[in-house]
Amino acid sequence: MRITIRLFGRLHDLAGATELVRELPGAATVSTAWTVLAEEFPAIAPYARSVSAAVNADFGKMTTPLADGDEVAFLPPVSGGQGPRMHRPEHAHDR
Amino acid sequence: MAELIRLVSGGEPGEPPAGHGAIVTFIGTVRGENQGRKVVRLEYEAYEPLALRAFAVIADEVRNRWPSARVAFHHRTGSLALGEASVIIVAASPHRAEAFSACRYVIERVKQIAPVWKREFFEGGDVWIEGASVDASDEASREEAYRRACE
């Protein structure tokens, strides 16, 4: 299947692109798209734990299945939650 | 701002004003200092269709928490100079307590879940400001915003 990938914030700086079209195997999920992308652009790999995703301009998850023609957007963390939630350790718990 | 006030006042053409007892407004502006850096300007980038989706989610949450409150809000994108407004929020309700809370709740939630990224240009460089991961369905974030709104 062919999908469009959109990158925002620091992710598009690291990848050097804001929009990409990639061919994915059938039964792909958002996670498949991320893996393909992180292999192509290793600089974005550290975002694996903090990145969020949208599919066709609605909130999605890494497990959301993809279909031919879908638009997947990868969203780095936004500015909110500065303070205790900022730069939290990988295994921190929210409360 | 006048447009947003009109939106929360029930002032559709031909419709009487809602007669709210309170309207609270918030304007977020570009701060000249951040974590010891002298800020020169900010650039905001948004994923607009998803931002509108996030705004609708936030408006629904406000309706559930404060049924008598009405809110309207707007976030700018692009390059903004020091002191310029980046976000404006208007909340109206019959009594001031709900209007203050709804207004605060909206800014907390916008900062948590709206896909809007801030790039800070300061003297000597620039940096993307990254805080929390975007998760519109995270209950803990919602409760944190509610706690701040009511403190």
Image (cartoon, helix red, strand yellow):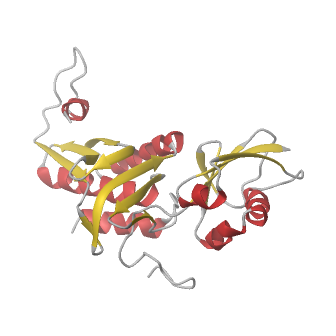
- Left/right placement of residue B131 relative to residue B36 reads right
Residue A34 falls in image quadrant = bottom right
Expressed as whole percent of the image width and height from the top left, the position of residue B82 reads 23, 53
**Count of marks placed on residues:** 0
Quarter occupied by the C terminus of chain B: bottom left
Quarter occupied by the N terminus of chain B: top left
Q: In the rendered image of this protein, does residue A13 appear above or below residue B48?
A: below
- The residue sitting at 10% across, 41% down in the picture is B21
Q: Which of B143 and A57 is in front in this view?
A: A57
Residue B68 in sight from this viewpoint = no
- The residue most toward the left is B21
- The residue most toward the front is B124
Expressed as whole percent of the image width and height from the top left, the position of residue B142 reads 41, 63
Residue A82 falls in image quadrant = bottom left
- The residue sitting at 44% across, 68% down in the picture is B131
- The residue sitting at 57% across, 82% down in the picture is A90
Q: In the rendered image of this protein, does residue B36 appear above or below residue A11?
A: below
Expressed as whole percent of the image width and height from the top left, the position of residue B70 reads 27, 41
- The residue most toward the top is B14
Expressed as whole percent of the image width and height from the top left, the position of residue A7 reads 61, 52
- Left/right placement of residue B134 relative to residue B3 reads right
- The residue sitting at 23% across, 16% down in the picture is B13
Q: In the rendered image of this protein, does residue B61 appear above or below residue B48?
A: below
Residue A61 in sight from this viewpoint = yes
